[in-house]
Image: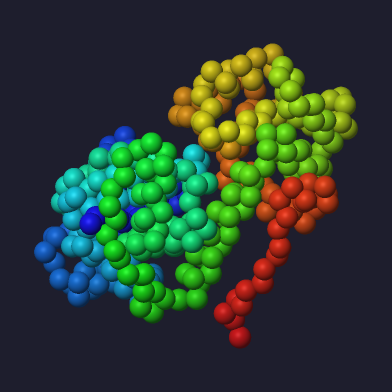
Amino acid sequence: MTTIWMIRSGRGSEHVEAFVEHGVAALGWAKLGKLDPLMKKDDLVKLFASKHPEEREGQQQAGASQVFRFLTEVQVGDQVVTYDRDRRTYLIGEITSAYEWKPELIEELPHVRRVMWTHEVSRDVLTTATKNTLGAIQTLIKLTSEAAKDLTTKAMLRGQAAFAPAVAEPEDAPEAEERGAYVEEQIGKADDFIEDAINLLNPEQVPQLMAGILRAMGYRTTVSEPGPDRGVDIFASPDGLGLQEPRIFVEVKHRQAQMGSKEIRAFLGGRKRGDKCLYVSTGGFSKDARYEAERADVPTTLITLSDLRRLLVDYYETIDAETRALVPLKRVYWPSGRK
């Protein structure tokens, strides 16, 4: 029976490509320096406190506990899962090395375990309970047997070789867990579920959602009729006619696959001075696509699913009722902790 660990690739999955490129799973807390895998937990807690005096005691203990587990509990042969937020995909692999100190690979995440990445599982096929478990705020957690079984079963159903998960008890909350950290975790889960709701929209609805956001920002919009060869999906400008700048041209692709440089070049063809371009891809963008947008002659902004969610939440109060109906949201109030 195999133990499965969740190891996050930085905030917003920012280092997931480096995880795959270098074949690693890695933790931050670079100030700790190179660690001795045989060091005692009490010594690690003291080191953590000395290197991170700005954090509260509970946060220091929680961080030290995660690093200690990475050093001592994670074993060669264990399975590891990390999340690719842009692609809405969980990557699964096998730990193949003991602890290593490798700041040259990912400067922000220098504590490393080598990994052979072998599986991919779409977030969309997982149960709500599994999504909740995988949405925990901790950088490193051991998966429950239910979440591990769901991941491996769905991998098998998608034509990939599955492995047998270990029977693990649910994780206890970290000692001295603070309300602020718990609130942050719930916000993170809410963000994920809002992205789930957007992802459930059909290809005709996502352009309508983006157009509604642009209207909330003060622009007038025209949305192309559904169908092939329709040119740009949305045109927006202050007057709705394009006589006033900026003239905003928007392409929207609602699919799991990443957009590449070829798609960006095709979209930018024919754009002229005064134009502004937005390319929305719920499947994310390749490195080459981002480079193509950066070097474009006209200002071009790439919008991922996470970016679309942030825009929706930021402008939700001023979005029209028709657009709100696409992704209905409810405001939730939480105690601030102040007396």
User: On the image, which quarter does residue 18 sit in?
Assistant: top left
Q: Where is residue 219 in the image (x, y as percent from the top left)?
A: 81, 38
Q: Is residue 60 left or right of residue 113?
A: right
The one nearer the camera, 264 or 75, is 75
Q: Position of residue 85 (x, y in %)?
A: 48, 45
Residue located 38% across and 43% down the image: 155
Q: Where is residue 56 in the image (x, y as percent from the top left)?
A: 39, 75
Tell me: residue 89, above or below residue 269: below
The one nearer the camera, 166 or 70, is 166
Q: Is residue 331 left or right of residue 13?
A: right
The one nearer the camera, 31 or 327, is 327
The one nearer the camera, 279 or 217, is 279
**Furthest residue in direction left, as rendered:** 38
Q: Is residue 202 left or right of residue 264?
A: right
Q: How many labels does the image show?
A: 0
Residue located 35% across and 38% down the image: 160
Tell me: residue 69, above or below residue 333: above
**Furthest residue in direction top, as rendered:** 270
Residue located 71% across and 19% down the image: 228
Q: Position of residue 60 (x, y in %)?
A: 33, 71
Residue located 58% across and 33% down the image: 255
Quadrant of the image for the N terminus?
A: bottom left
**Is residue 120 in view?**
yes
Quadrant of the image for the C terminus?
A: bottom right
**Is residue 174 in view?**
no
